[in-house]
Amino acid sequence: MTNTDAADVREIGIGVIGMGGFGLFAVQQFLQVPHTNLVAIAGSKREEAIAVAKRFGAEQLGSLEELVSHPDVDLIYIATPPFLHYEQSMLALNAGKHVICEKPLAMNPEQGEEMLALAKQKGLLMVTNLMQRYNPMFARVKHLIDKNLLGEFLHGYFENYAGDEGLSPEHWFWDREKSGGIFIEHGVHFFDMFAGWLGDGKVIASRILKRPNSADIEDQVQATVEYGDEATGKKLVNFYHGFTQTGRMDRQEMRLLFERGDITLYEWVPTRMVMRCVADEETTRALMDLFPGAQLNVTANIGGKDRTLRGRHKTFEAYQQIELKFGFGNEKQHIYSELLRLMFRDQSAAIHYPETHRIITEANGLTSLETAVVADRMARG
């Protein structure tokens, strides 16, 4: 794009539905993308919404209808509970507005398909904010898998030990009619992440557990998803989400096992990595290029006849057993902020130039929702 083209780009006016804590966090990042302006907020009288309106000089409107009909609003950002996504998105799309919606896309695939069909008909965005794929760590792991740097990927897990201190028994999160349940409200991020690494997956088992002495609170879920086929080799990934922890002990971990090592990633948006593996000289160089600045610890040197190793009835060479640590100096909130900026920059570019390639498209929201709904339904028999 030339300087002349950049000067001709029209400003994107944002309207927001659901200006709570995360809404503020996200909008602050969106507005750092050039040619972007917060026009109006609707449907909230909370202190956060009032403060944001004052800070950015935005209008505070009394109804959603006023927001979607506002002539200066081009895109509606929706950060409300899941049961409202379908109705609010359809209202915005029918008014000719682009939509970026917090996950999940909708409460079920049927709603999602209708939303995407309307957006396509009108030439509009209908994007779910699955920002994980904008993480540089995501791309590094994708490269590791695709290039077989540690041999073939074999197995993975994601463990989410989430805090529930801010979720009172009356919170909408526990109400399946409003949230869809943990798989749908929360799990879509991670179903999409592993699909990005491994391709489409098939849910083969799932469970939901209720909190003891509680009739309605479902606080733990687990699913096993199968990736690959007979030709490429099938792989299993386990997903666990438990909203059971005090806030100070909220933590997440995922591990990916390969033929010659494994990596452990930390945080729900992975920011830190520990790799343990055996490697030859060429592979070590490739790994250090992939994870620049990583700390390399040598666990053991391997020489002579011991250089030839075997596993899975395969033979390969290695000269060291090593551990790599990467990303431990990063500030995770800053990384989260950058991912939101990258996501919005990607989508806003598509508004200006519709043929632009996007990392996340409408399909991601629907595919991840479909996987989540299968897991939820399978767990209920």
Image (tube, helix red, strand yellow):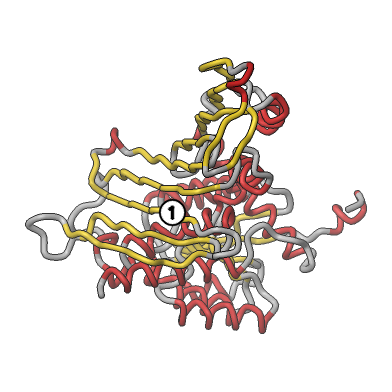
Question: To which quarter of the image does residue 267 belong?
Answer: top left
Secondary structure of the residue carrying tag 1 is strand
The answer to whether 140 is drawn above or below residue 15 in the figure is above
The answer to whether 119 is drawn above or below residue 194 in the figure is below
Can I make out residue 341 in this image?
no
Q: Position of residue 177 (x, y in %)?
A: 28, 72
How crowded is the residue under tag 1: few (<14 C-alpha within 10 Å), some, or many (20+)?
A: many
The answer to whether 286 is drawn above or below residue 8 in the figure is above
Q: What residue lies at 65% left-to-right and 61% top-to-bottom? A: 13
Q: Position of residue 341 (x, y in %)?
A: 63, 47
Q: Position of residue 211 (x, y in %)?
A: 15, 55
Question: In this rendering, would 333 be left or right of 174?
Answer: right
Question: In this rendering, would 62 be left or right of 247?
Answer: right
* Nearer to me, 91 or 314: 314
Question: In this rendering, would 176 be left or right of 104?
Answer: left
Q: Residue lying furthest front in this view? A: 305
Residue type at the position of mark 1: Val
Q: What residue lies at 54% left-to-right and 41% top-to-bottom? A: 259
